[in-house]
Image (tube, rainbow, N blue to C red):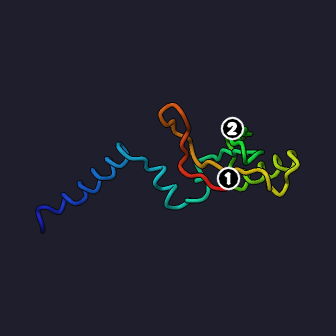
Amino acid sequence: MDQNGGCLPMLFLLGIGAWFLFGDPGKTVANWWWPNDAAPWETVDAFYYPNVGDLSIVQQKHGLKDVQACRDWVSAAAYIARDPMMTHSDYECGLGKPKDYQGMMNVYRATVD
């Protein structure tokens, strides 16, 4: 029997441990299996811009369960704003928990529309 047979499993476990310590396994797995929707442990934040010419005006809804819930909320907001076809407005859905970027903005795992 090979005397180095125990090294391979140990290296594998060390690699997994390093991934958990230095990486973001939840984000990686979410990107693999749910690239365009929320993973089961994530939520979605909706951003509706009523005027495409002025993106500083935004309506937000946080903690939605999936992208379809985001789109439903945005459709209702657009209907209330009298732009149900969204000809003058826009939106995006932020997936996952946002991370602060240099104190100026939040960065999501992914954004979809």
Pick the front one: 10 or 82: 82
Mark 1 is surrounded, within 10 Å at the Cα level, by few (under 14), some (14 to 19) or many (20 or more) other residues, namely many
**Helix, strand or loop for disc 1:** loop
| Place of residue 76 in the rendered image (x, y in percent of width and height, measured from the top left) | 83, 49
* Residue in the picture at 28% in, 57% down: 12
Looking at the rendered image, the quarter that the C terminus falls into is: bottom right
Residue at 53% in and 33% down: 104
Residue type marked 1: Asp
Which residue is painted at 76% across and 45% down in the image?
A: 51
- Seen as rendered, the residue at the extreme bottom is 1
Q: Which residue is mark 1?
A: 66
In the picture shown, does residue 89 fall above or below 36? above
- Is 4 displayed left or right of 48 in the figure? left
Residue at the limit of the structure toward the top, as seen here? 103
Residue 62 image position (x, y, % from top left): 68, 40
Amino acid, disc 2? Ser
Residue nearest the viewer, comparing 75 with 68:
75
Residue 39 or residue 81, whichever sits in front = 81
Instruction: Locate residue 44 relative to residue 52 in the image: left or right.
Output: left
User: Sequence order check: which comes first, mark 1 or mark 2?
Assistant: 2
In this rendered view, identify the residue nearer to me: 29 or 72. Answer: 72
Decide: few, some or many residues near mark 2? Use Cα within 10 Å; few <14, some 14-19, many ≥20. Answer: few
Residue beneath disc 2: 56
Q: CA distance from mark 1 to mark 2?
A: 25 Å
Q: Are marks 1 and 2 in contact (CB under 8 Å)?
A: no
| Residue 111: image location, x then y, percent | 60, 52
In front: label 1 or label 2: 2
For the N terminus, the image quarter is: bottom left
